Image: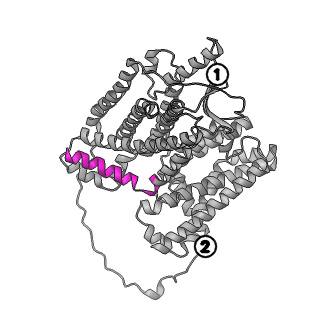
């Protein structure tokens, strides 16, 4: 058991002491700030037929618990699904493989570490929600039990299930990160949209949010004196909130069946770890070489000839930037599995054939998101392969090396979007073409910026996923590629963001070089 807790402690501290986790923590605070909007905000997160609850402890606790359960269940998987891979990369796995610990205990230690990381973010949201309660409340006093009750029963079991799934996906699909991300996204979407109207279905809801939403709907139906279905929106709904009516929400009396179901989710998750333990490779990932009988060859030594230095060609210095850009472009093209290029080809084909609006609004962001594995290592691959000292001591590492990485990334995303760019240039105003062009530049400098400040690829993968997800759901503030009508101010803001991120990349890299 001491070894078990040592693995949990070491893994948790290793994750939480990184720049990426610090930035993620700050981003979580910023997002938690929006879970309950101010009284006169231009958006809402939970609204039932034009009704929102009074800002009492129950409303604050349940709304933030629901939003946190859904948000961290989605993002949390992508934050913690690299624990085994990290041990493989850092060679710690070989020490673990030789240690007297079973597969189950090791996988369980990784699961608990995943869970503690997500609970740290959950605690951050809880503290931010309590602060916002004192800022926004409608004159109600803080009822701590009403505030904490939904947090215990709704997000905590959901986050434990996510922690187990992240570990299981690594065991089964360890070499296929893109496949892990895609399968989990579809699984999450299916669980989120599945209908739940009775107690048994509420028990099957892993996120634990549908029983609360059902209670809210019934409360509003009682106010409106109707049994007909009424509209309920959850998420960031942009629009006026001045006409919203208030109702008193006192919380949910969770049934015994629901409470037992939350405990069963925990036990079933542990059971999944038990079942998956025999399939864990225990870091024995080398393929067994086939034994072949080799016939010894008799080598005849040839007389060596003297090498005349005067006959060798003269050394020529070439400081051109184009060979570097070509090399970086080839690295981007050859990165990842070959079958991904089949998807890229299909995406480019759809950009050329589908109706222009559909291709622009849906196909383009999905095609660019498929390149997340390539772009996430745009400025971190030197450190990943331990050649950063060599690369950073080369001739003009910022003007040549970093610039060539950015330029190659831009060429890469523009080539992928070329069918749509040609169609937009022919059929759309110049402003639309300019926004798509800035969007391609934005993706590259955004990847470079997050890679430099976090010294890893995980932060960009999570951030780009959230940006793509919100954009595909039609939120105008996340429409970085201009699929919705925008004015000159939008173009100016996007241009300023691109310039700010680009300048930050060069300045931060320059600071790192001076600090070496």
Which residue lies under the disc numbered 2?
320
Occupied quadrant, residue 149: top left
Specify whether 287 is left or right of 2: right
Quadrant (top left, top right, bottom left, bottom right) of the N terminus: top left
Occupied quadrant, residue 152: top left
Looking at this view, is 18 or 285 the one in front?
A: 18
Looking at this view, is 125 or 271 the one in front?
A: 125
x 69%, y 58%: residue: 496
Occupied quadrant, residue 233: top right
**Residues at marks 2 and 1, CA–CA distance in whole angstroms:** 62 Å
Label 1 residue SS = loop
Q: Can residue 324 be seen from the camera position used here?
A: no
Label 2 residue SS = loop
Which residue lies under the disc numbered 1?
231
Q: Can residue 463 be seen from the camera position used here?
A: yes
Labelled pair 2, 1 in contact (Cβ < 8 Å): no
Q: Which residues are magenta?
A: 1-21
Q: How is the image coloured?
A: one colour
Looking at this view, is 31 or 79 the one in front?
A: 31
Residue 299 place in picture, x, y as percent: 26, 68
Looking at this view, is 400 or 161 the one in front?
A: 161
Disc count in the image? 2
Residue 69 place in picture, x, y as percent: 48, 34
Between disc 2 and disc 1, the foreground one is 1
Residue 381 counted in the magenta span: no
Q: Main secondary structure of the magenta part?
A: helix
x 53%, y 76%: residue: 395
Residue 16 drawn above or below residue 200: below
Residue 270 drawn above or below residue 378: above
């Amino acid at each position: 058991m001491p070894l078990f807790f040592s693995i949990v402690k070491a893994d948790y501290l290793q994750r939480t002491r990184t720049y990426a986790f610090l930035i993620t923590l700050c981003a979580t605070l910023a997002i938690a700030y929006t879970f309950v909007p101010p009284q006169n905000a231009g958006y809402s997160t939970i609204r039932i037929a034009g009704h929102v609850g009074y800002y009492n402890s129950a409303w604050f606790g349940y709304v933030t618990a629901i939003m946190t359960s859904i948000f961290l269940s989605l993002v949390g998987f992508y934050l913690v699904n690299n624990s085994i891979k990290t041990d493989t990369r850092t060679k710690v796995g070989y020490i673990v493989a030789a240690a007297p610990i079973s597969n189950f205990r090791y996988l369980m230690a990784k699961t608990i570490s995943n869970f503690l990381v997500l609970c740290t973010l959950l605690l951050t949201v809880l503290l931010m929600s309590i602060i916002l309660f004192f800022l926004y409340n409608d004159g109600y006093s803080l009822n701590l039990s009403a505030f904490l009750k939904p947090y215990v029963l709704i997000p905590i079991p959901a986050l434990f299930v996510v922690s187990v799934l992240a570990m299981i996906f690594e065991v089964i699909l360890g070499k296929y990160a893109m496949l892990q991300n895609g399968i989990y996204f579809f699984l999450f979407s299916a669980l989120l949209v599945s209908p739940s109207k009775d107690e048994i279905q509420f028990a099957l809801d892993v996120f634990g949010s549908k029983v609360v939403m059902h209670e809210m709907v019934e409360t509003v139906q009682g106010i409106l004196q109707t049994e007909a279905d009424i509209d309920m929106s959850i998420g960031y709904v942009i629009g006026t909130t001045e006409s919203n009516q208030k109702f008193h929400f006192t919380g949910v009396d969770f049934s015994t069946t629901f409470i037992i179901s939350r405990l069963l989710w925990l036990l079933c998750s542990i059971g999944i770890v038990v079942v998956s333990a025999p399939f864990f490779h225990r870091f024995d990932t080398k393929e067994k070489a086939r034994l072949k009988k080799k016939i010894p060859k008799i080598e005849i030594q040839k007389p060596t000839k003297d090498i005349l230095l005067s006959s060798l060609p003269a050394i020529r210095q070439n400081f051109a930037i184009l060979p570097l850009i070509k090399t970086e472009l080839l690295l981007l093209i050859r990165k990842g599995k070959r079958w991904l290029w089949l998807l890229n080809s299909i995406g480019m084909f759809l950009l050329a054939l589908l109706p222009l609006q559909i291709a622009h609004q849906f196909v383009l962001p999905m095609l660019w998101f498929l390149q997340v594995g390539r772009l996430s290592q745009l400025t971190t691959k030197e450190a990943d392969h331990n050649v950063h000292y060599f690369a950073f001591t080369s001739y003009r590492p910022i003007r040549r090396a970093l610039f060539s990485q950015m330029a190659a990334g831009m060429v890469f995303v523009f080539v992928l979007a070329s069918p749509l760019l040609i169609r937009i240039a022919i059929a759309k105003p110049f402003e639309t073409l300019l926004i798509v062009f800035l969007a391609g530049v934005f993706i590259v400098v955004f990847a470079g910026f997050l890679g430099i400040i976090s010294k890893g690829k995980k932060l960009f993968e999570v951030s780009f996923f959230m940006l793509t997800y919100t954009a595909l759901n039609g939120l105008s503030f996340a429409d970085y590629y201009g699929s919705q009508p925008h004015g000159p101010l939008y173009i100016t803001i996007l241009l300023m963001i691109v310039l700010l991120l680009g300048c930050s990349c060069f300045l931060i890299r320059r600071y790192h070089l001076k600090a070496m």
